[in-house]
Amino acid sequence: MIKCHRKYGIALHMEAPSLYEKYYGLKERPFNVTADPNFLFFSRKHREAFDHLIYGIKERRGFLEITGEIGTGKTTLCRALIGQLDPNTKTAFILNSNLPETQLLFAIVTDFGLNAKPKTKISLLTELNKFLIEQLKAGSNVVLIIDEAQNLRSAQLEQVRMLSNLETDKDKLIQIVLVGQPELRDKLNSPELEQLRQRISVRYHILPLDKAEISDYITHRMRVAGSDGSVAFSPDAISEIFEYSGGVPRLINLVCDRALLLGFTMETKEITLDMIKRSVEEIEGFVRI
């Protein structure tokens, strides 16, 4: 597909990512919106969130809660966390939290690599409890991460709370990380979930990047993608990126990817303020006449 910029006569060759990467000397696109842990930028907030998670897991604190607005990198952080945990830590990562109670439990058991037959709630809990006891005897830790946890209904959250009852006199057999948008905090503050709220020992809310971090974020992702530093974002362009994105990494990625595509079609490696403004217009669907 070729999209033509009507005022400037620029043909945006959306079907040619290989040319885009070759022009900039990249091995891959630096601003994809997928949750690739290799591209995780440790802002001060992301580092603090990561350290909170590591502490809560290693100290077997039971329930942990990580929240943040849409696009702040929560899923990417979780994938990076899994990659950094030692081999004696067994993990399950649930991305689809919008499941009925028994199916959610089945997804958890399956992601731990277990096979419970028949697939009833009792058999699933029995298999999971057996697994947790075996891991404790082997000196291993067990971590369950539930992404988009704000979608969990109260009954599902109560079922997750019941999983934390699988413990010994001294140790939590499973560490449960609830990851979600700010609505998760509101939901956990409801009176019917007081028992669960009281069990959450580690909480952290990830804020967007500061304006001063935008340039480092862009440089980091370009470097990971293989850039030799020849691409330059002007200070005014950086400021405009912050104004548009509010420091939300996903929005930064969208506008930077569009700007690089525009730079490719214009045959320039200098990303200017005007290019960012035009990229934002493209993203928002504005058309220059």
Image: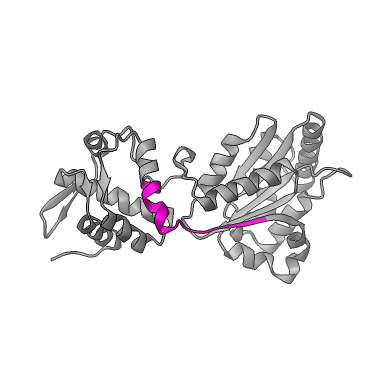
Residue at the image point whose x is 27% and y is 58% from the top: 236
Residue at the image point whose x is 31% and y is 50% from the top: 256
Using the image, determine if residue 191 lies above or below residue 117.
Answer: below
Q: Magenta span covers which residues?
A: 203-218
Using the image, determine if residue 27 lies above or below residue 152.
Answer: above
Q: Position of residue 139 (x, y in %)?
A: 78, 31
Query: Is 17 situated left or right of 93 in this image?
Result: left
Query: Magenta segment: does it hold 212?
Result: yes
Residue at the image point whose x is 65% and y is 62% from the top: 153
Residue 155 lies in what quarter of the image? bottom right
Q: Position of residue 91 (x, y in %)?
A: 65, 38
Using the image, determine if residue 251 lies above or below residue 192.
Answer: above
Q: How many tags in the picture? A: 0
Q: On the rendered image, what quadrant is the C terminus found in?
A: bottom left
Q: Nearer the viewer, residue 159 or 145?
A: 145
Q: Position of residue 36 (x, y in %)?
A: 46, 41
Q: Is residue 177 visible?
A: yes
Query: Magenta segment: does it hold 55?
Result: no
Q: Is residue 98 visible?
A: no
